[in-house]
Image: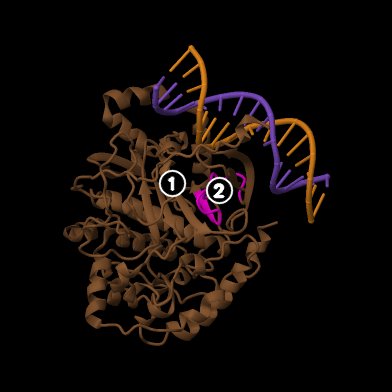
Chain colours: A brown, B purple, C orange
Amino acid sequence: MATTLGIRSKIKEENTLQSKSSESADEMDQVRQENGRLKLVLSNMMKDNKTLQQPIGNIKDDDKEDDLVVLSLGRSSPLEAKSKDQLRKVNKQEDDNLNHGLALRLDGRSYEYAVDSIDAGVSKSQSPRQTEEDSLNDHKCPPTSSTGLKASRSEDDENLLQQHAAKKARVAVRAVCNGPTMNDGCQWRKYGQKIAKGNPCPRAYYRCTMSPSCPVRKHVQRCQEDLSILITTYEGTHNHALPPSATAMASTTSAAVSMLKSSSTSTSQPSLGFPSTTSTNINRPPFYVPNTTFSTSQSHPTITLDLTTPSASSRYSRYSSTFLPPQQTPYSPAACLNFSAASSSSSSFEHWRNHNISSSLYNGTQLQLPSQTPLYQANNYSMPHKSTRVQTHQPQFSMEKIADATKEITSNPSFQSALAAAISSIVGKKGGGIAENMESPLSVGFPTSHLNRTSTIVPSIFPQAGNLKFDFPPFASSKGPSVAGSADNFRK
DNA sequence: CGGTTTTGACCAGCGC
DNA sequence: GCGCTGGTCAAAACCG
């Protein structure tokens, strides 16, 4: 057997996630979500709420050698810990984005991330032409040579940071999946497989084949510790329309990266608004998103969405009353997810959505949505096999708590950014709802189904988002291409 | 027969 | 400079 495929059982003990504290970023340059006719300028929002930002993660300062900044946000795998090695790979494809990136300050360093290209999974302003050019530039003109990078690392941090800026963000999704890969709706072609260091499970490399020029890649690897967990890492930006069944994952990755961007730019601390299971200094719980890990190394900044654990534990029950399904049951996202390749998730989801949304969403009580619609369902992740649970055990909300939670949530820059990203992408696709907005990132971490249907809800629930002007078309569950069967169309 | 998967080889970045 | 590693290529095999 080839050496590249030989089993390397060497297991590194890198479970200790390392992170670096960071100083406050004073400025947030304009984050513009330009999508069609909508432009959202969030800088004011960020500034207004900067004082509310709180450190979230249990920031460790163990290892300064590694430019790995990870918030301990729930379970992490050795693979993720080793992402620092993976992330060292220079992605020359992003070099062109240096000049129009956002600034991320981590550990007092300033990192820039490209605005246009950082959104993994969802195309934005990047045109196929641009993508092609970027791709071509991969081979033509890396702005800085590897030797230059090395020199900069030893002599000039600024140059190094610019190298960081050139790296494309990645979004890793950890999810329970029995199939060889997640059914994320896209059409992928496997182009390689390798045994990655530290994990005997082979890592498969896929590229998107929905468009010949689509630069999106993903690699899939099983978690060594739990073979039922599939870690899918997305990189790149689709330059084509996505099928509805692919919107969910694309939305997740996009929103996650948006959070990464916004958090990076709005606060020095890697307090990205995500719950941390190890946080010791949480004065205020953040708004809820799945267990999420951010990391950045010498290469790709990576956000890991851990959908395998009941991330919204009782720690966040206060806020789960607003944005989470009731936790009376061991609510594991994985339980709601079905990424099995054999799943008929798309059609099922459509059925679920029609059923649940119609029956529970518009009952006149906005705040019942979170209780009746679990987060992951709102994010199009949910599958109907657990739908019966949705209707049970509604918590009694205290308006005071709701208001408090709302304030917390809306003041979080990550939320704001994700909200803006979701809104802009949705609104940008004029005349369509979710189903039509095949490229629309919805969100991760909050029920954007709110946003999709009732524009009036947003100002009321998210008062600090009141300066966002938008006019959503009705929820288009019955509009646009049918989701049913779409996944199978892209899967063989 | 066309598309996809497999898999050995190759390349580049990085650490030592 | 060398070895390790991640990532990609491309020919052969496979499949519907």
- Left or right: A334 as drawn, with respect to C11: left
Element on which disc 1 rests:
helix
Q: Which residue is depicted at the point 30% across and 56% down?
A: A278
Chain that bears disc 2:
A
Residue nearest the viewer, comparing A452 with A473:
A452
Residue A285: quarter of image: bottom left
Picture layout, residue A376 above or below residue A68? below
Hey, which residue is sitting farthest left in the picture? A51
Residue at horizontal 43 percent and vertical 61 percent from the top: A425
Give, as a three-letter code, the residue at label 1: Glu
Tag 1: Cα neighbours inside 10 Å, few (<14), some, or many (≥20)? many
Image coordinates of residue A66 in percent, x first then y, are 33, 36
Residue A478 seen in the figure: no
Q: Which residues are magenta?
A: A211-233
Q: Which mark is residue A220?
A: 2
- Residue at image mark 1: A80
**Residue B11 x %, y %:** 56, 24
Q: Chain of mark 1?
A: A
Residue A361 at what x, y percent from top left? 43, 82
User: Up-down: is A152 above or below A281?
Assistant: above
> Is the N terminus of chain A in the top left, top right, bottom left or bottom right quadrant?
top right
Horizontal side of A274 relative to A383 (left or right) equals left
Of the residues shown, which amino acid type is indicated by label 2?
Val
Q: Do tag 1 and tag 2 residues touch (Cβ < 8 Å)?
A: no
Residue drawn 55% across the image and 75% down it? A384
Q: Give the residue displayed 46% in from the left and 45% down from the top.
A: A79
Please tell me if label 1 and label 2 are on a single chain. yes
Task: Tell me where residue A328 appears, x and y as whole percent.
Answer: 40, 77
Q: Can the viewer see residue A473?
A: yes
Tag in front: 1 or 2:
1
Any magenta on residue A354?
no
Residue A4 higher or lower than C1, as above or below? below
